[in-house]
């Protein structure tokens, strides 16, 4: 097949999380070629005329959608999906509506709570309704991922401190910010891959904070995610095997993932992030409808644990897109 790998239009001076998109797009193209496809790369240009001209030149049978941001913002990534939908071209990953809803963290949390799926309490400005002064919160961007703005100072207590942090982050990074109850516990990043029209929960990955300094919040912040030589990155270790050691917890996590997949109408691939509190209760932190596919990151690691090499994983994602398009 002729497959166009469509990626974010990343400038040369973009931060590390955006530059990573280009390396991943090249890796996906190489994987497609290893599977016998003809693969081309092109940046997504949010101009209808430029977009249609680029697609016409490539003349693809399908598009592997690697657009993680538009104008440098993840919240605009659904625009690429919507333009591909209008053009009636089979493309990988989630549809625009699912991307937009699942990618809005407070909105997604409200939907999770409405169907009884567990998620930590949260509060939003300006009222900060329900925010308790006697417990810690983590201040997050409402619509951006890649751990934007997350560091030790993100975890704090008290309405005044939370409001001040959200205000300063909004001034520095832009966008909406909210506060989520900080759960001191274990973290799981669980990959889901569509197979034959149904979600397959891949082996469950736990992020362990090994030899973590006392008093520091255990979070996968921006430094841990994007600065590979940092203490935070080296001491945040991915581990598998929960299905063998704690089968009941593993079953609960899988069931939550499957219900979330159905709730948001997800397709192709996604990731669900959890914290498990001291009592063993799983809580959904976020739904990621567009997780990173770089060969060394979590989704590919979970696929390898399931017996799928990188080209096979890429092929499965492409196959799901073709199935959705009826091809």
Image: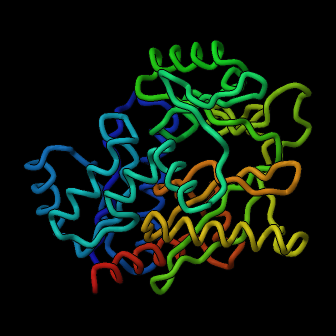
Q: Is residue 73 above or below residue 104?
A: above
Residue at image location 16% in from the left, 52% down from the top: 51
The part of the image, by quadrant, that contains residue 310 is bottom right
Nearest the viewer among 149 and 60 is 149
Q: Is residue 53 left or right of residue 290?
A: left
The colouring scheme, among rainbow, by chain, secondary structure or one colour, is: rainbow
Task: Please state the horizontal and vertical placement of residue 286, each as a whole percent of the image.
Answer: 58, 50
Residue at image location 63% in from the left, 48% down from the top: 285
Q: Is residue 148 left or right of residue 302?
A: left
Task: Please state the horizontal and vertical placement of residue 47, each as a whole percent of the image.
Answer: 14, 44
Task: Please state the horizontal and vertical placement of residue 146, each as a whole percent of the image.
Answer: 54, 40
Nearest the viewer among 248 and 186 is 248
State the quadrant of the C terminus: bottom left
Task: Please state the horizontal and vertical placement of residue 237, each as a whole percent of the image.
Answer: 80, 49
Q: Is residue 15 left or right of residue 281?
A: left
Q: Is residue 153 above or below residue 224?
A: above
Nearest the viewer among 207 and 43 is 207
State the quadrant of the N terminus: bottom left
Nearest the viewer among 9 and 31 is 9
**Image label count:** 0
Q: Is residue 280 above or below residue 61?
A: above
Residue at image location 37% in from the left, 68% down from the top: 92
The part of the image, by quadrant, that contains residue 138 is top right
């Amino acid at each position: 097949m002729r497959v166009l790998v469509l990626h974010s239009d990343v400038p040369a001076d973009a931060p590390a999380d955006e530059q990573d998109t280009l390396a991943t797009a090249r890796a996906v193209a190489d994987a497609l070629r290893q599977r016998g496809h003809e693969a081309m790369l092109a940046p997504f240009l949010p101009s209808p005329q430029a977009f249609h001209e680029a697609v016409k030149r490539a003349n693809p049978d399908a598009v592997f959608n690697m657009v993680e941001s538009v104008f440098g913002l993840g919240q605009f990534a659904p625009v690429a999906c919507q333009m591909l939908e209008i053009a009636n071209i089979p493309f990988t990953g989630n549809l625009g509506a699912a991307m937009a809803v699942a990618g809005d963290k407070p909105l997604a949390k409200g939907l999770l709570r409405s169907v009884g799926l567990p998620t930590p309490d949260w509060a939003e400005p300006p009222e900060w309704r329900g925010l308790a002064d006697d417990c810690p919160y983590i201040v997050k961007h409402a619509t951006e991922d890649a751990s934007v703005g997350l560091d030790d100072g993100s975890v704090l207590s008290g309405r005044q401190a939370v409001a001040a942090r959200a205000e300063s982050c909004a001034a520095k990074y832009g966008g909406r910010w909210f506060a989520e109850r900080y759960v001191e516990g274990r973290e799981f990043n669980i990959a889901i891959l569509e197979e034959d029209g149904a979600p397959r929960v891949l082996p469950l990955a736990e992020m362990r904070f090994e030899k973590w300094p006392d008093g520091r919040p255990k979070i996968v912040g921006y430094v841990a995610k994007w600065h590979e030589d940092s203490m935070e990155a080296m001491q945040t270790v991915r581990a598998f095997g929960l299905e063998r050691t704690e089968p009941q917890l593993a079953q609960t996590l899988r069931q939550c993932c499957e219900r979330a997949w159905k709730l948001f109408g997800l397709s192709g691939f996604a990731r669900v992030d959890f914290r498990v509190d001291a009592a063993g209760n799983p809580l959904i932190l976020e739904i990621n409808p567009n997780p990173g596919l770089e060969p060394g990151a979590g989704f590919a690691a979970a696929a390898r644990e399931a017996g799928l090499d990188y080209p096979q994983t890429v092929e499965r994602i492409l196959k799901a897109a073709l199935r959705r398009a009826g091809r």
